[in-house]
Amino acid sequence: MRVLISALLLVALTGCTHVRSTQDVSLSGEGTWLVLPLTNRTATPQAGLRAAAIVESVLFRHGVQAVDAYPDSDNDGVLFEASSPGSRDKMKQWVSTRNGNYVVSGVVHEWRYKTGVDGEPAVGVMLEIRELPSGNIVYSGTGSRAGWARDSLSETGQKVIDKLLKPVID
C-alpha cells in the first residue's frame, strides 16, 4: 500500500508547475500592456520570441484589453534575441515611443525537450512587469515545469506563463 501511495504522489508531483513570485499584486487589464521579447538564455533559437508570443495570448485571455508587442522587424540576434546591449537600447527606445501602462519583459532560462527515452518538454521563465512611466518593477515571478512525454514544448510554456500571469491581472 505504501508503495502505491508513494507512486501516486510521485506521479502527481512530476507534472506540477513551480512558481515563485511577488505576492498580492493586482494590476488593471485596462490600458495598454507592452510586451518585449524575452531574453533568450538557452541554446534554443528564438525561445524568447516564442515565449513573448505566448505572453501576448495569455494577457488577452486574462482580460487585458490592449497588447502592443515589440515588432520582430529584423533578424538581429536570432539565437540570443534581446540579450545584446544594442537590442536592449532599441527596446527601451521603442517603449519610450508608446503610450503604455505596463511593460512585460523577462528571461527564458530553459526551453527544450529533455534527452532520454520520453523526451519531456522542460521550460523555465522569469517575467517582470514594470509600471509606466516610472519604470518601477511591480511584479516579478519565476516559473518552471517539466511536462509529460506527449506534451508539446509550447503547451508546457503556456502553462508556466499562465501560472505566472493569472494572479496578477484583476
Image (spheres, grey):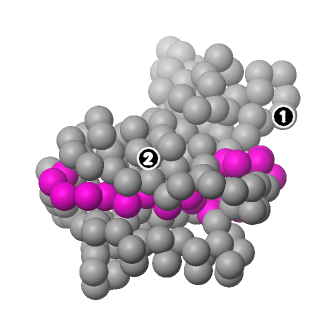
Which sits earlier in the primary sequence, circle 2 or circle 1? 2
Q: Are marks 2 and 1 in contact (CB under 8 Å)?
A: no
**161 in relation to 134, above or below:** above
Q: Magenta segment: does it hold 75?
A: no
* SS state under label 2: helix
- Mark 2 nearby-residue class (10 Å; few <14, some 14–19, many ≥20): many
Q: Magenta segment: does it hold 43?
A: yes
Q: Which residue is mark 1?
A: 115
**88 in relation to 44, above or below:** below
Q: Main secondary structure of the magenta part?
A: loop
Q: Position of residue 94 (x, y in %)?
A: 47, 71
Quarter holding residue 7: top right
* SS state under label 1: loop
**96 in relation to 169, above or below:** below
Which residue is painted at 50% across and 58% down in the image?
A: 70
Q: Position of residue 132 (x, y in %)?
A: 28, 76
Q: Position of residue 28 (x, y in %)?
A: 16, 57
Query: Along the line of sight, which residue is nearer the eye, 147 or 133?
Result: 133
Which residue is painted at 83% across and 22% down in the image?
A: 117
- Using residue 16 as the reference point, say whether residue 58 is left or right of it: left
Q: Position of residue 88 (x, y in %)?
A: 60, 76
Looking at numbered disc 2 in the image, what kind of residue is underneath it? Val
- Mark 1 nearby-residue class (10 Å; few <14, some 14–19, many ≥20): few
Query: Along the line of sight, which residue is nearer the eye, 14 or 133?
Result: 133
Looking at numbered disc 1 in the image, what kind of residue is underneath it? Thr
The residue furthest bottom is 134
Give the magenta-colored segment's residue range. 29-48
Which residue is painted at 46% across and 36% down in the image?
A: 159
Please indicate, yes or no, whether residue 15 appears anywhere in the rendered image.
Answer: yes
Please indicate, yes or no, whether residue 140 appears anywhere in the rendered image.
Answer: no
Q: Which residue is mark 2?
A: 55
